[in-house]
Image (cartoon, rainbow, N blue to C red):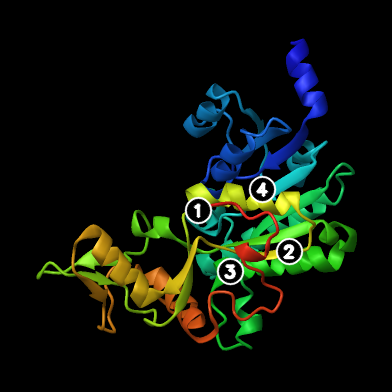
Amino acid sequence: MGNTYHQEMVSKVIVVIGATGVQGRSVVDTFRKESSWTVRAVTRNESSEKAKALQAEGIQTVTANLDDPTSLDIAFKGASAIFSVTDFWGTYFSPENQAKAKPEQKLIDSAYELELQQGKNVFDAAAKVKTLERLVFSGLSHVSKWSKGKYKHVPQYEAKAVAAEYGQATYPELWKMTSIIQIGFYLENFLASPVSFHKKDESGVVQFLGLLKGDALLPFIAATHDTGPLTRALVEVDGGKNLMAYRGLITYDDFISLWSRTVGIPAQRNASPGDPGLPEFLVEEVKEAFGYMADFGYGGGDPTLVHPKDVSITPRL
């Protein structure tokens, strides 16, 4: 008991939202190895199997919901650092959230509104924490802004970007200690995703989704491994960073070629305009997102973006 109490007294506390998800779990795994940090893992359900797994590993968990500002106030109390991530698709597919949609409102638009409010709730709660030294907010590019209105229907990007702008405008002092981490193109997408990014045809050639141009430069990241080390780097340096987070920056065609050589299966970018594997509700959103990446780059040419090499404490990925 005494040793545990002493540990809590001398350690800084990092609160990790989404601790049972891809990004959050990576942050938990990184900071739990640091003797100078105590991890407080935020979960919506402490009795879930994933939450129980954290508890079994000796990680402190706390119940909080991004839709409930009061629960965030409790979860954030005494924090030195906060890692925040909002989950657009989790919000979209939640039956509880789907029931909140207004009459005649598309679920994708309802999910945008809900995720945006969740991001605002994080900034509102974090601004009250007097012990806070760093907020790392998982965001994405402001598509409509950087494309000058050419692309307007990428809600899972926009909700995060607009929430960050809210934080900047509303809490200038908090913003000085805030860094944005823009997670790149998930390598995990090629393992499990609602979108079929690659599919073997009848001739045995793997066809990669052709909606994205071959010369589009993509920041690939293994989010389960890389989010934590990159977040730690942002916590250790001054705030105010807008990090494009990735382990490799290569073109889509080069990635397909590398994938083919590594796996030993012939592969190519699908030249057909009717790519298979897209659910109807995703067609417009994915076309807009990939069009944006092709025309403006993954980060949209945002002049405030920095790369992993620009962060003074850069981890090996």
Q: Marks 3 and 4, Cα distance to the nearest angstrom?
A: 23 Å
Query: In the picture provided, is 107 more to the left or to the right than 137?
Result: left
Which sits in the foreground, 209 or 120?
Answer: 209
Q: Residue 214's x, y, as percent?
A: 36, 81
Q: Earlier in the sequence, mark 2 or mark 1?
A: 1
What is the spatial separation of the Cα atoms under label 2 and label 4, in whole angstroms?
13 Å
Q: Measuring 50% from the left and 33% from the top, which residue is drawn there? A: 50
Residue drawn at 58 percent across, 69 percent down: 157
Marking on residue 232? 4
x and y percent of residue 135 in the render? Answer: 75, 52
Q: Please state which of the two labelled residues, at mark 1 or mark 3, is closer to the viewer.
A: 1
Residue occupied by mark 3: 157
The span from disc 1 to disc 4 (Cα, nearest Å) is 14 Å
Give residue 215's position: percent from left, percent from top.
41, 83
Amino acid type shown at disc 3: Tyr
CA distance separating discs 2 and 3: 18 Å
